[in-house]
Amino acid sequence: MAQIFHPSINSISRLSIVGAVLAVLGFSGALYAVNLSYGHRVYLPITQPVQFSHKHHVGDDGIDCRYCHTSVEKTNFAGMPSTHTCMSCHTQIWPDSPEIVPIRESYVSGKPIAWNRVHDMPDFVYFNHALHVKKGVGCETCHGRVDQQPLAQKVHHMTMSWCLDCHRAPEKFLRPRNAIFKMGYKPSEPQDVIGKRLVKEYKIQHPRQLTDCYTCHH
């Protein structure tokens, strides 16, 4: 009986199967990457009632993070600046600028500005700003170079896996407390050296405790 299929069909079939599997994996990887960026709104500037520029206020004017985020060293929340904080400068600087009309209106009415959140952790996640600051985690570690951001935006997806990278090896991320609010921080010695020292000095828990479910979900 004559052969129906050419011998090369077997090879083509194998290659087709391998190609299909690789295509599925590649497509899945692409979807995952898109989700980590657009799905988590990474690198997407958030529209605000007032288009506040961290680049101008922090990068150009050198305003310290704590001037606006007054509770970052004391409570779970970093806090948002009151209208009075804004107007402490803007009664003198650009007082008639149309860019700050919502601030002037808020100052007169006493109604706080409804800022849109850039980082919004799920309700089932417990995060304490003050604790992280005390333990040597810099603002830049989570929020990136805000001094270079014309409009505030997320630079990390802040999923559970991202948080666990630090909790599993905190020595890779710690910095001295006097550099917590410094943008563009460069360690004065190898990070593994200073990190291991700070783990002891700041009494950082063992990764076994840091990665326990109860640490972040209680």
Image: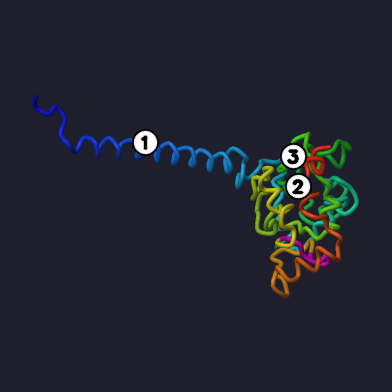
**Figure check: 113 above or below 78:** above
- What residue is disc 3 on? 121
Q: Amino acid at mark 1?
A: Ala
- What residue is disc 2 on? 211
Q: Amino acid at mark 3?
A: Met
Quarter of the image for residue 200 reads bottom right
Judging from the image, what secondary structure is the residue with disc 1 in?
Answer: helix
| In-front residue for pair 213/189 | 213
Q: CA distance from mark 1 to mark 3?
A: 38 Å
The answer to which of marks 3 and 2 sits earlier in the sequence is 3
* Front disc: 1 or 3: 1
- What residue is disc 1 on? 20
Residue furthest right in the image: 74
Residue furthest front in the image: 1
> Magenta part of the protein: which range?
173-179
| In-front residue for pair 67/24 | 24
Judging from the image, what secondary structure is the residue with disc 2 in?
Answer: loop
- Residue 86 place in picture, x, y as percent: 83, 50
Contact check, label 3 and label 2, Cβ < 8 Å: no
| In-front residue for pair 60/34 | 34
**The N terminus, quarter of image:** top left
The answer to which of marks 1 and 3 sits earlier in the sequence is 1
- Residue 171 place in picture, x, y as percent: 74, 62
For disc 2, the neighbor class at 10 Å (few under 14, some 14 to 19, many from 20) is some
Specify whether residue 178 is painted magenta.
Answer: yes
For disc 1, the neighbor class at 10 Å (few under 14, some 14 to 19, many from 20) is few
Judging from the image, what secondary structure is the residue with disc 3 in?
Answer: loop
